[in-house]
Image (spheres, rainbow, N blue to C red):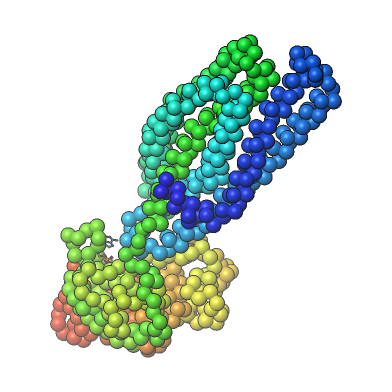
Amino acid sequence: MKLILWLWKKYLGPYKWKFIAGLTLVFIAAIISTIGPVVVGEIVYVLNPLNTDAFGNMDRLITFLLIWIGITFGRSIIVWIFRMLFEVFSQDATCLMRRDLYVKLHEMDFDYFSANKVGDIMALMTGDIDAVRHFAAGVLPGIFEGSAWLGLSLFMMLRMDPLLTLILLVFVPLIGFFARRLVKTVRPTFKDIRDSFSSLNSVVAENIGGNRVVKAFVREDYEIEKFQKQNLDFRKKNLASTWVWAKYLPLLDSFSASLSAVVIVVGGIFVINGRISIEDLVVFNGLLWMLAWPMRMFGWLLNDVQRCLASLEKIKEMMDVEPKIPLVEIDTTETAPVKGFVEFKNVSFHFEDDDSVAVLKNVSFATRPGETVGILGETGSGKSTMVNLISRFYDAVEGEVLVDGKNVKEWNARKLRDSISTVMQDVFLFSDTTAANIAFANTQASMEQIQYVAKIADAHGFIENLSDGYDTIVGERGTGLSGGQKQRLSLARALLKDPSILILDDTTSAVDMETEYRIQRDLQAISENKTTFIIAHRVSSVKDADLILVLNKGEIVERGNHESLMAEGGYYSTVYNDQIGQGGDENGK
Ligand SMILES: Nc1ncnc2c1ncn2[C@@H]1O[C@H](COP(=O)(O)OP(=O)(O)OP(=O)(O)O)[C@@H](O)[C@H]1O
Ligand SMILES: [Mg+2]
């Protein structure tokens, strides 16, 4: 109930007028439906030879026939209108909900995306939202419609013959009892179905993403089997739910069937006794359908309500997730741009789910605008994690990360990130034109600006050579481009932002030394006031940095510039001599 109230307040409430208009029509249609049997009663009255006052009165017969046809058509039209109204109502509500969920998705931090699978989120955005739509379009109006029918038919019946009506009501407690049991047993099955659907989605999403790997390893059969397992599970869960339902359906059906039997037997006796007329019995029987139908429908509706609740619970769960790093919590009236002083003070860090392993230990260093910091270290030593703390993608567990002397936790995350450009290690490009990909930070950027940064990133040349130049559509995740091309495109994208802090995480790992040299030379020319972080495996990438940090298992083990580190004769000088000795390995490893 709480969930439904939440749904009403947030998503259905804003469109309440459509709903109220729809409900009004539902009640009008229900009233017309109640009149139907009465008109039929009048028609039978004319046909009954016992009614000497009216028997064979053609005028009267035709009049009532016309009324009957009129209300039948009228009712159909009203039903059509309210169905449309509810459809629009449900689409409005789910459109709003979908948008809110999407906004929420963008508020989520890295932790959320590490913990949740794409398929699960997709299932939420599609299947679960559709369950809510179905609820708003059909189930909710159905409950009101059923109640109206029930109420009105009972009212009419009680007026006609209270005794016969009360005899009919003997089944109501039984129906209530079984309905409760149905709800209790069917609810968990819908949760199972929902979760199974989520897993099914995850398998598909993962396989679409990883289709190349599957093909390269010829693991199609294995993956199909994995999917089929999930597929069979989904089938099983659905059937289990149907089975619960199937147990109760005949019960509810037989109740409504018995109602007819009661009316015919008891009503028949009443007619013979002269308590009611034959016309009354016809009307009663007509109204009975209006009483029995909702009773049958309530089973279905309860079932669907449970299905919707299972989905709604998941949706609410996502809406309620509070990202640990809120985007806009801190309102900065400060308009001064970020200058680019970065300082780490005894920073330690571990990931939430794995607090036994410290990823960063006691990291301290400071740098100022215009300086370049080179970060070296074995794979897994914590380089990417370290720079992620600057943008506050994660919060330091101990110690402080300061930007312009202020703890990053005190910065408005949006403003902070807006001044930092990160070229992430795993490049992601959108399926859009190359120009649009570069201009991601500023869609208003002019072609000159785009080309300017593309030239610095040494991307201009290859972009010009693409079939449509800057208008070439890049495939999803950048398919159609080489690894080095993707890196250069994402570097151009980062530069267009003209950030105060530029972070290059292994950005030139896939380009040759010659190109890397050109890029670094051009970067230096534009990074006078910027603080630049360069993470690399190749010593040549960081050789000219003002400060070089060598990380080992999350600790800074060496620091200094090229000369001092060479003199020290530690890890740095060993790697340098190795790489230079090799004449500069392409991958620098
Ligand atoms: N989301 C995560 N959850 C848990 N552990 C993580 C997560 N991301 C990284 N790690 C762990 O943190 C450690 C440091 O990872 P990080 O990505 O910072 O290394 P790196 O120095 O950038 O390595 P590489 O040179 O390979 O890029 C690794 O041991 C890794 O397993
Ligand atoms: Mg890394």
Residue drawn at 80 percent across, 24 percent down:
61
Q: Is residue 30 left or right of residue 95?
A: right
Residue that extends furthest to the top in the rendered view of this protein: 272
Q: Position of residue 571 (x, y in %)?
A: 17, 75
Residue that extends furthest to the right in the rendered view of this protein: 59
Occupied quadrant, residue 269: top right
Q: Is residue 582 visible?
A: no
Q: Is residue 486 visible?
A: yes
Instruction: Tell me the quarter of the image containing the N terminus.
Output: top left
27 up-or-down from 353: above or below: above
385 up-or-down from 92: above or below: below
Q: Is residue 93 left or right of residue 396?
A: right
434 up-or-down from 12: above or below: below
Residue drawn at 56 percent across, 34 percent down:
151
Q: Is residue 149 left or right of residue 496?
A: right
Q: How many marks?
A: 0
Residue drawn at 38 percent across, 57 percent down:
320
Residue drawn at 55 percent across, 82 percent down:
448
Q: Position of residue 248 (x, y in %)?
A: 44, 26
Instruction: Tell me the quarter of the image containing the C terminus.
Output: bottom left
Instruction: Indicate the quadrant of ligand 1 in the picture.
Output: bottom left
Nearest the camera: 59 or 339? 59
